[in-house]
Image (spheres, rainbow, N blue to C red):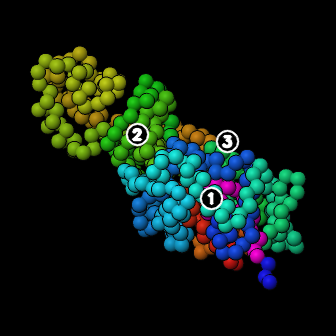
């Protein structure tokens, strides 16, 4: 009788769990080793504890979202996608709902329920999960992969899947161990950078705006006087800069530019639904009577933003709106359409939702997630140099690459 393939998965996050479960279901003997005392620690904090598991976007839209290297993920998405994930969750007691922007969440709004469902699926396939165990190296025998080294010993295996995550949120166990393991096998590690991360601005007055949320605004990334990308939706001011969904998405462009020491500006259009000319005409119609400009602005902006906005426009807060002249009105319109901030940096990698960079996709076979350099070694999830926008894209990529790595390792 043929001995079952022995597969070791390093990391018990979303990618690791899918890799282990899929490998075991086609007959492999699978063991997960996890350095934390419990599996799925980072999964529990995704989506602010609600776990945005995927998105209703098509495979084509997913591939485009991971540009410029989105084609690398096409095979993984084709083998395991949203419907397959939902089926696993449903079969293990978790119902799924769709929210704004096509985001999929568990109906209970509890990431813990998603983790419990995945653990049930994995354990029912006979996977052994060994927590509190750190992988310290790859075990080699006559230049061939033979297993993994762990603290205090070794584990022999035919195939190894590295699903250790990136370098964001290190307190969840994503400390870059996987990069070191891959590098020891000769793999190139693209410099890890924060992605989906708040941005720090040079303007000190932003501290006065901390906590103010803006809805239905458009933020635009500008570098060297070139407009690069825009996002419309929600954002929030922090103590030192900008955050919120549209800012996090634009950080994917901003952070690499900052790493190249390029100038980066975020321009916020507070009234994106109307043109500058239409806004001019609106103000002409509305700015009549004895109301002060301070009070009038509160009909256009959050109350806390109005005083600082007037300062930036060089307007007297107590001036009667009917006394505002053409030049002052133009300054007001210009600032409403272009509230700009010079970006000095991003928040640290430890605060990023995901990591940009990681194992070069050029050294991974997209048809299997297998290493092109060391037979028997596979990769899954955030350890790979892939990162997408917010909205469930990154978790789906983790699930899909995990599944593909698992079935490939078990059948190779």
Query: Sequence-wise, which precedes: disc 1 or disc 2?
Result: 1
Q: Which residue is drawn at 47% across and 56% down?
A: 95
Q: Where is residue 402 in the image (x, y as percent from the top left)?
A: 61, 64
Q: Residues within 10 Å of mark 2 (few under 14, many from 20)?
A: many
* The N terminus sits in image quarter: bottom right
Q: Is residue 220 visible?
A: yes
Does residue 403 appear left or right of residue 198 in this picture? right
Q: Residues within 10 Å of mark 1 (few under 14, many from 20)?
A: some
Q: Which residue is drawn at 50% across and 31% down?
A: 240
Indicate the secondary structure of the residue bearing disc 2.
Answer: strand
Does residue 40 appear left or right of residue 266 in this picture? right
User: Which residues are the magenta region?
Assistant: 4-18
The residue that mark 1 highlights is 120
On screen, residue 10 above or below 1:
above
On screen, residue 116 above or below 371:
above
The residue that mark 3 highlights is 171
Q: Magenta span has 6?
A: yes
The residue that mark 2 highlights is 235
Does residue 282 appear left or right of residue 254 in this picture? left
Q: Which of marks 1 and 3 is in front?
A: 1
Write down the quadrant of residue 122 in the picture.
bottom right
Q: Nearer the viewer, mark 2 or mark 3?
A: 3
Query: Sequence-wise, which precedes: disc 1 or disc 3?
Result: 1
Q: Which residue is drawn at 70% across and 65% down?
A: 126
Q: Nearer the viewer, mark 1 or mark 2?
A: 1
Indicate the secondary structure of the residue bearing disc 1.
Answer: helix
Q: Position of residue 28 (x, y in %)?
A: 72, 72
Q: Position of residue 401 (x, y in %)?
A: 59, 65
């Amino acid at each position: 009788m043929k001995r079952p393939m022995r597969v070791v998965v390093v990391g018990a996050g979303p990618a690791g769990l899918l890799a282990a479960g899929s490998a075991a279901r086609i007959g492999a003997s699978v063991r997960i080793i996890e350095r934390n005392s419990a599996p799925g620690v980072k999964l529990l904090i995704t989506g602010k504890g609600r776990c945005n598991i995927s998105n209703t976007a098509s495979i084509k839209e997913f591939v485009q979202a991971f540009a410029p290297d989105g084609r690398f993920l096409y095979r993984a998405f084709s083998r395991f996608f949203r419907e397959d994930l939902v089926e696993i969750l449903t079969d293990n007691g978790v119902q799924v709902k769709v929210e704004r922007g096509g985001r999929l969440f568990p109906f209970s709004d509890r990431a813990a329920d998603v983790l419990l469902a995945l653990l049930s699926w994995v354990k029912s396939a006979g996977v052994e999960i060994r927590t509190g165990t750190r992988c310290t190296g790859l075990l080699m025998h006559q230049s061939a992969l033979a297993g993994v080294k762990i603290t205090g010993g070794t584990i022999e295996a035919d195939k190894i899947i590295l699903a250790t995550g990136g370098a964001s949120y290190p307190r969840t166990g994503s400390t870059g161990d996987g990069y070191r393991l891959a590098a020891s096998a000769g793999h190139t590690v693209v410099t890890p950078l924060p992605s989906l991360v708040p941005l720090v601005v040079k303007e000190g007055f932003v501290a006065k705006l901390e906590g103010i949320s803006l809805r239905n605004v458009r933020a635009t990334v500008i570098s060297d006087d070139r407009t690069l990308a825009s996002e419309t939706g929600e954002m929030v001011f922090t103590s030192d800069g900008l955050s919120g969904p549209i800012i996090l998405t634009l950080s994917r462009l901003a952070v690499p530019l900052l790493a190249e020491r390029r100038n980066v500006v975020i321009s916020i259009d507070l009234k994106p639904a109307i043109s500058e000319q239409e806004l001019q005409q609106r103000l002409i119609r509305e700015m009549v009577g004895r109301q002060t400009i301070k009070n009038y602005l509160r009909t256009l902006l959050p109350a806390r933003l109005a005083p600082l906005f007037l300062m930036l426009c060089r307007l007297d807060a107590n001036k009667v709106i009917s006394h505002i002249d053409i030049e002052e009105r133009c300054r007001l319109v210009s600032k409403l359409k272009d509230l700009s901030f010079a970006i000095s940096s991003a928040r640290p990698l430890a605060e990023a939702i995901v990591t940009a960079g990681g194992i070069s996709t050029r050294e991974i076979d997209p048809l299997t997630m297998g290493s092109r350099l060391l037979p028997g070694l596979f990769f899954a999830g955030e350890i790979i140099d892939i990162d997408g926008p917010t909205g469930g894209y990154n978790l789906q990529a983790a699930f899909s690459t995990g599944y593909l790595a698992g079935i490939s390792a078990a059948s190779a």
